[in-house]
Image (cartoon, rainbow, N blue to C red):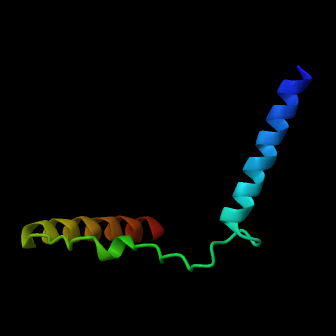
Amino acid sequence: MKMLIAAIDEEISRLMKARALLAGSNGSSGMPGRKPVTLTATRVKRNLSPDARKRIADAQRRRWAAVKKDSR
C-alpha cells in the first residue's frame, strides 16, 4: 500500500513539474489572447415589411393611449 502511495506521489510531482513548464512562472503563455468575436459582426439585418411596421406602430399607439387614459 505504501509503495502505491509513493508511486502516486511521484506521478503527481512529475505532472506538477510538467504543468509548471507549460504554464510558465506567472501562469500565462506570454502570448496575448484573441479578442472575442462580437455577435453584432455576424448578425444579418432583418427588414420589416411596411405592413408589419404599420401594425407595430398602431399597436404602440394603442398602448400609449391606454397609459395616457389611465393617468387622467
Residue at 31% over, 76% down: 41
Residue 11, image x, y percentages: 77, 41
Relative to 49, 64 lies left or right: right
In which quadrant of the rendered view does residue 30 lie?
A: bottom right
Residue at 73% over, 48% down: 15
Query: Which quarter of the rendered picture does the N terminus lie within?
Result: top right
Residue 19, image x, y percentages: 70, 57
Query: Which quarter of the rendered picture does the C terminus lie within?
Result: bottom left
Relative to 45, 49 lies left or right: left
Judged from this view, the residue extending furthest toward the right is 2
Judged from this view, the residue extending furthest toward the top is 1
Front-most of 64 and 38?
A: 38
Residue 32, image x, y percentages: 56, 80
Residue at 71% over, 70% down: 24
Count of all numbered marks drawn on residues in the image:
0
Residue at 48% over, 76% down: 34
Front-most of 5 and 38?
A: 5
Front-most of 20 and 27?
A: 20
Residue 51, image x, y percentages: 8, 68
In which quadrant of the rendered view does residue 17 lie?
A: bottom right
